[in-house]
Amino acid sequence: MPPKKQASKAETKQQKGGDNVDEAPLQAVVLADSYNRRFEVLCLDQPRILLPLCGVPLLAWTLECLSASKVKQVFIFCGVHADKIRDFVAESPFQKQGLLDIQCLSSTTAYTAGDALRELDAMQVLNAENPFILVHNPIVSNYDISQMVDAHKKRREVDKNVIMTMGVGRGGRQHPESPIMLVHPPSSRLLSYSLNPISPRRHRVTFASSLFLDPWPATIDEYEVWSGSSASSSRGGYRDLGIDICEADVPALCTENFDYHDLRRHFVNGVLTSDLLGKNINVHLVGEQTATEEGKPPRMQGGRYVERVRDTRSYGEITNDILRRWVFPLVPDILFFTAEYELRRGNVYVSRENVLLSRTTVLQGPLLIATRCTLSHNTLIQGSTLGTNCSVGPNSTIRTSYVFNDVRIGAHCNIEECIIGDGVVIGDDVTVGKGALIGNGVKIGNGVTIPEFARIGRVQYRDDDYDSDDGSDEEEDAKSHRLAVLGPDSVGYIWPNEEEEEASDSEDEGEDPYEHPRNKRLLQLGRRISNLTASTASLSTLSVASTTPPDSPVSMASSDDLEGVAHLKLNDGPPVAFFSEARSSLARAYLEDHSIPNALLELKTLVMGYNSGIDLAREEVVNFFMSKCPTQGGAAKILGESTKIWERWGGMASSFSRDAAEVAIAVQTFCVRNPEYAPWFGVYLRALYDGDLVDEPSLIEWRSLSTARGEGAKESEREAFKELFAKGKQYVDVLEQMESDSDEDDDDEDEDSE
Amino acid sequence: MAADLKPDPNARLVDALVVRLRRRQIVGSRNVALATAALVQNVVRSAKFATIDELLAMIRAIGRRLVDANPKGEYQAVWVRSRALESASPSRLEKLAAGNIVRRIIRLIREEYRAAAAAHMSQPPSVPGTPGISTPPGGSYFTGPGSGPGSASASMPSTPIARQASLSNFVAMRHSRVQGERSGNVSVVPAQGGTPGTASSTGGSGLDGRASNGLDFSASTNALFAPPRVVTLMAADQEAASAAEFARTAGKLKPVLIQAIDEVVNELETTHEDVARGAKEHIHSSEVILTLGHSRTVEAFLKAAFRDRKFTVIVLESAPSYLGQHMAANLAHHGIPTLLVPDSSLHAVMPRVTKVLFGAHSVSANGGLFALAGSLACALAARTHAKPVVVTTGQFKFAPVWNLYHEFDALDFQGPGPVIGYDHDGGGGGYEGVEVTDPHYDYIRPELINLYATNVGDHPPSYIYRIIKEAYDDEDIEL
């Protein structure tokens, strides 16, 4: 590998520099607790940060990344199971080889990240002079975070008010937790940060007006809106990496503002919107060429993969990325804290120790099989990881699943897209649906089918206000139900559906939009973002299955309501609010006699705001003005009144239509739907013509349109359409004749009517 | 190993180097070699040792640790051809500069020691091996070859017997070891490979062929070498008494030994210049040279030749690392007429080319080499168009290993980022569902190479084993 000499030389120099006494060691803080319950069923007896990812605890991935980023001192802020984290750290090679100075800080009183920072501030362990790296979730990365720290320091030299730099990555998959950020890239300044859950989709992003008013920013042309990847383009979006470079002000500010809980929702927004504070937050785009990297070929620039394990969805995705070598050189066959793996064709990693594969075993990469695994004949493993000491019975299939250690899987099983905890025993002929999470020590009997997205724990589910006294004895029917789902002689309890828990919280004022049940559901392994409706059927089975625990709100979660999903489609039309608002806007314009441009502006804003499209808008306009036309009093009166209306307001309808024939169609539709108008359709058509809204060619075009004859209309309305068409046709035919007879007459008529 | 080294203050240094190697913070065989040499020098400087054995064991332990820790990922052959071989894929195809340099240092230390010992006893040792090291306790020596290949290979490295310095010897060592690892499954093929003549005449390709047939002849070679070993041991025992006396004074030799390591470091540092010295003999006026990637040896070579000759260089850009672009920039900066072409035009430009020149990452004893991905395509294209292929390399890249299993190889698989980009909507920024394979090295068979231009002279591939033989002691081949 002849290249990279300059790079490594520079690195040696830097390392020597780093060893100098004058330079303070780089510090990092890892928040070990997730402060949410996404992994709870797998984390009953171990902290989330010690869950294995490709056979290596998440904490080890994080520490390896930090250590490679020249971090010298790490504080792990532990919540529950702090002793386990301590034990792991004491045994880890980082501590032993002196790569990192790791200290575990434990606190059982911190319930949010804000609490953690407050306690950190109180402990006074951080070096106040230097920025530290704050890692929110376990990260898997080959990016050198010290570059971000350097960039932060440089920016701070320019602007003393920068107290934090947020890591932002480019590209990557769609994730339900991607923010929308308003950024000024030349100065890397973050101007606004808003959460943008995928479901229910938010239709508007609000930016504080103070950003644009007094004074109007001179550099507004350079502002950019950064949002997450979307389904509509193959270009990846921007994502929040959950890595912050913080000055000592950050914990201090958290202490001052005791209501800061979530660092993004509260802290970042609080700092950005506060006029008094005068502090700035910057962003750092990973992979953006820095001065030191400029001109180096890609290979020398180091990796730029940064991902964090936030939920079971990202857990699965990151595992696959690791197996596809995105995090090179952190790949299973090189990592020192794993057993030795042999890399085979197609990103298949098989441990070199005591793996027993049958001749008829089929391995379809990317996958990983750890030591002492035994695979019987006719097994198929695809895109999965198997922990140490697992056995898979004959004719079983495992696809895209993540199996921890010491798991026994029986014969003829079918396991798809799930996570199976330590020591789980699965009997024969078991099907585990996708998205299922099976906690440590669960035993599943023969011949059952575990519903999709089920969560099965060794102990019963307890929610926050769980009363420990009355939970010990299980009701008899619940038990029989449990045994029916999990099979005879099974061990374990079915937990309620994830998105259903904590339902009470959702009414809170400061609700986290990411924790909205619909969005939360998308955080689960096995959910497809692109095709949300696909899982409807499975969800209903699941809610049946999860009715087990008495008094849980499960039964309320009826088979499914996926209206929220509709918002993801482009053409689903505007919400009801649009129609009412449009109607009232039109009414106002009509009553107060607004000028056409003003009324139009108001209506167009509504159309844009609700993304309703012009077809609906035209329909709405025509409906409104048609309703103003009289239906009584004879043809002459009706014609006169209607013509007046269309002369005055016709511009509204024509601005929402591509050609005048569409207006005619809209009028026809209106008449079909309102039978009292139907007899006068010909007259209305004439009024349109007299009111200069439609001209003769358009009417002729209308006559030739198939939709005018009722094609494409509803069965019930088709007859009415035909009827009206006949009426209209008469008039148009007459008109055509008149036109061809004498143009002058026509002109005269026009003049008359004006 | 870590536990053994724990009390040693140098353990931390070794660990640190291991970590940096693993994280790819040091890449490039020369950098690795330099770092290793510096480490060993440090160890020798601070280590306390009574006998030379202790010191050598210490250095060897470091070497083993470096070799064990680092290159496993790097040298895993994936694209093996037969299924049987796939499951028995060579677990220890290690041939990194780290191992080489440790071997070289051990050899030099031993030489220094030998010279000193000779001066001390004022009589030449009767066997070329050092008496001092040949006295491990216990009767492990007398476990004959019959006791199983595992134990035989374990005891072999410490037997400094007067073996015939020949290729077959080399093959035997290698094979008995592989055999030991596979343990069992012995198919003895008599005569073939047992006689030195056959093996050296068939050369590397023959060995490849045989290995992929699944043949092993270590049992026969073990048998071949067993009798002389026992005999020399008797002789060594007699000498041991007088040598042991001197061995205790080994600590005094420290400055000399450090100097010996300095020599190695110097040799490494001047490799480029030494290789480039003969450049004008290889490059003639108005030649068109094709090269790829960015080998510093090649760069120095071309620059040296440009002092005397006028020629043109065509550089392949070498995607996805695009190291060729840097090479081209450096050459052009030096005034050499340079043409940068994409890899895809390799065959199109080949007819105009008069010589192909590239660097190696490491050269194996059969004359085959590992080089930047694309080199194999280059060598094959050159073969098709009947152009000579010259490899410039330093001696430190010669590794006493045989690539017996693979005719084609792709090694050291990198992440997909450089190939597919980072800002799409798939995992990591790639495209969803697109699998990427990005090997960094190619294995090139010896038949495709015409000449190795090295700092120890110019040699055909079939002669590489000899250079390796001269560079390292037999007993160190197994670290």
Image (spheres, rainbow, N blue to C red):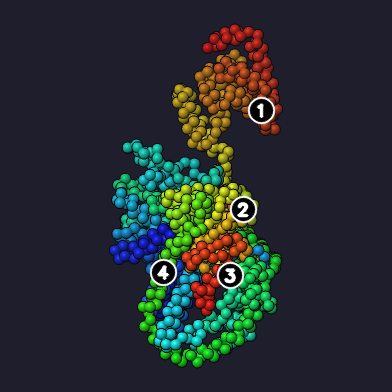
The residue singled out by tag 4 in the image is B265
Image point (39%, 56%), residue name? A147
Image point (42%, 79%), residue name? B112
Any part of residue A208 in sight: yes
Task: Inspect the image, locate mark 2, and give the three-letter code of the amino acid beneath it.
Answer: His
What's the distance in space between the residues labelled 3 and 1, CA to CA?
80 Å
What's the distance in space between the residues labelled 2 and 1, CA to CA?
70 Å
Callout 2: 10 Å neighbours few (<14), some, many (20+)?
some
x and y percentages locating residue B353 in the rendered image: 56, 51
- Comparing A8 with B164, the one in front is B164
Q: Which mark is residue B385?
A: 2
Q: Find numbered disc 4 in the image and state the secondary structure of the residue it sits on.
A: helix
| Rendering quarter of residue A524 | bottom right
Q: Find numbered disc 3 in the image and state the secondary structure of the residue it sits on.
A: loop
The residue singled out by tag 3 in the image is B402
The residue singled out by tag 1 in the image is A707
Instruction: Give me the chain letter of mark 3.
Output: B
Judge if badges 2 and 1 mark residues of a common chain. Answer: no
Q: Nearer the viewer, mark 4 or mark 1?
A: 4
Task: Inspect the image, locate mark 3, and give the three-letter code of the amino acid beneath it.
Answer: Trp
Specify which label sits upstream in the sequence, 3 or 2.
Answer: 2
Specify which label sits upstream in the sequence, 3 or 4.
Answer: 4
Instruction: Give me the chain letter of mark 2.
Output: B
Q: Is residue B181 left or right of residue A118?
A: right
